[in-house]
Image (cartoon, helix red, strand yellow):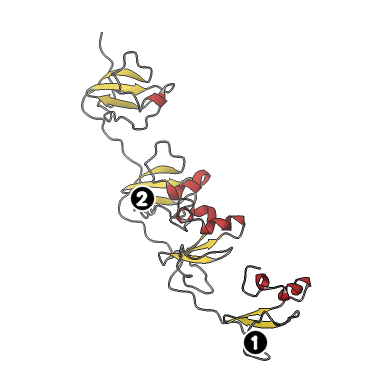
């Protein structure tokens, strides 16, 4: 009897089968000029079995012969009101739900439900990716919008991030001289010093430890340094382990001024080297 054709309305062969590629139920491939369809029930085996090699294969169903190629359908445009491609995807950038990027001439949109994965997954690499949704093709570039500044009151970038520095809650750093991040103010701040995988903007788990503040330009203007006492300017005497200190007494250690506490903890000001000013206690 007559063999079935692939599609009477759009005659042609689909893409050639590629071992290891991700295939879903209902997807069609060609092996030579023969057409096969991946079954939904056994779709997990479709990347592992070459169509036609296994008799009575449950993963692939033979549809019939095909010739030529399938004519491409018209692709959607990115944005008729603002034609052009958005910025190219950059791994590690803190993308949020609704953000659009380009990979070549294809536009993708970050999903709000899975936006935590958007900085670490290249759009289009994973089949059925829940982080990025393909929007369509684009040409040219999108007109730039104004970028957020780091701090409208004191514009400029904080000091560059360095893996050699121990950061604490609320500390701000700059990456690439144009992006500002802040170490989280909760318990996750401990990850700010947990190595390259948690580095701001570039680490796989950057968003666990750091909050993206926005773009920045230049450097932050320095703030005025506090003095020890406006009434009597100058430095107090150097700290001495032999001296006896009381609440409110001021001492100098390495150019920094320390005050002995007024409360019950003031008793520790004379409790030995472990409680000397500038130490861990």
- Secondary structure type for disc 1: loop
- Say above or below: 118 vs 210: above
Residue at image location 27% in from the left, 30% down from the top: 15
The mark nearer the N terminus, 2 or 1, is 2
Asked whether disc 2 touches disc 1, contact meaning CB atoms under 8 Å apart, the reply is: no
Give the camera-side residue of 74 and 27: 27
Residue 237 numbered mark, or none: 1
Categorize mark 1 by other alpha carbons within 10 Å: few (<14), some (14-19), many (20+): few
Q: Quadrant where the N terminus lies?
A: top left
- In-image side of 50 versus 173 (left or right): left
- In the rendered image, which quarter is residue 218 located in? bottom left
For this orientation, the residue located farthest to the bottom is 232
Q: In 3D space, how far apart are the residues under numbered discs 2 and 1 (Cα atoms)?
A: 62 Å
Nearer-the-camera pick, 86 or 90: 90
Q: Is residue 56 above or below residue 176?
A: above
Residue at image coords 45%, 54%: 203
Element under disc 2: strand
Residue at the right extreme, as displayed? 264
Where is mark 2, residue-wise? 102
State the residue at coordinates (50%, 78%).
221
The mark closer to the camera, 2 or 1, is 1
Instruction: Give x and y (percent) for residue 272.
Output: 69, 73
Going by the picture, which residue comes out furthest to the front? 242
């Amino acid at each position: 009897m007559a063999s079935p054709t692939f599609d009477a309305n759009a005659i042609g062969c689909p893409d050639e089968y590629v071992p290891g590629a991700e295939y879903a139920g209902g997807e069609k491939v060609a092996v030579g000029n023969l057409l096969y369809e991946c079954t939904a029930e056994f779709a997990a085996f479709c990347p592992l079995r070459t169509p036609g090699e296994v008799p009575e294969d449950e993963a692939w169903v033979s549809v019939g012969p095909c010739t030529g190629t399938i004519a491409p359908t018209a692709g959607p445009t990115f944005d008729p009101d603002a034609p052009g491609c958005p910025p190219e995807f950059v791994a590690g950038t803190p993308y949020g739900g609704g953000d659009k990027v380009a990979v070549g001439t294809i536009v993708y949109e970050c999903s709000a439900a899975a936006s935590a994965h958007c900085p670490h997954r290249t759009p289009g690499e994973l089949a059925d990716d829940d982080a990025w949704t393909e929007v369509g093709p684009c040409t040219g570039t999108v007109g730039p919008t104004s970028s957020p500044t780091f701090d409208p009151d004191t514009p400029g970038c904080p000091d560059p991030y360095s893996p050699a520095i121990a950061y604490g809650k609320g500390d701000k750093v700059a990456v690439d001289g144009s992006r500002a991040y802040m170490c989280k103010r909760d318990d996750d701040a401990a990850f700010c010093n947990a190595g390259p995988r948690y580095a701001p903007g570039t680490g796989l788990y950057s968003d666990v430890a750091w909050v993206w503040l926005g773009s920045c330009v230049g450097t932050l203007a320095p703030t005025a340094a506090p003095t020890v006492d406006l009434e009597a300017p100058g430095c107090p005497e150097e700290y001495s382990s032999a001296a006896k200190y009381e609440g409110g007494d001021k001492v100098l250690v390495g150019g920094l001024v320390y005050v002995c506490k007024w409360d019950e903890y003031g008793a520790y000001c004379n409790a030995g080297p472990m409680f000397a000013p500038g130490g861990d206690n």
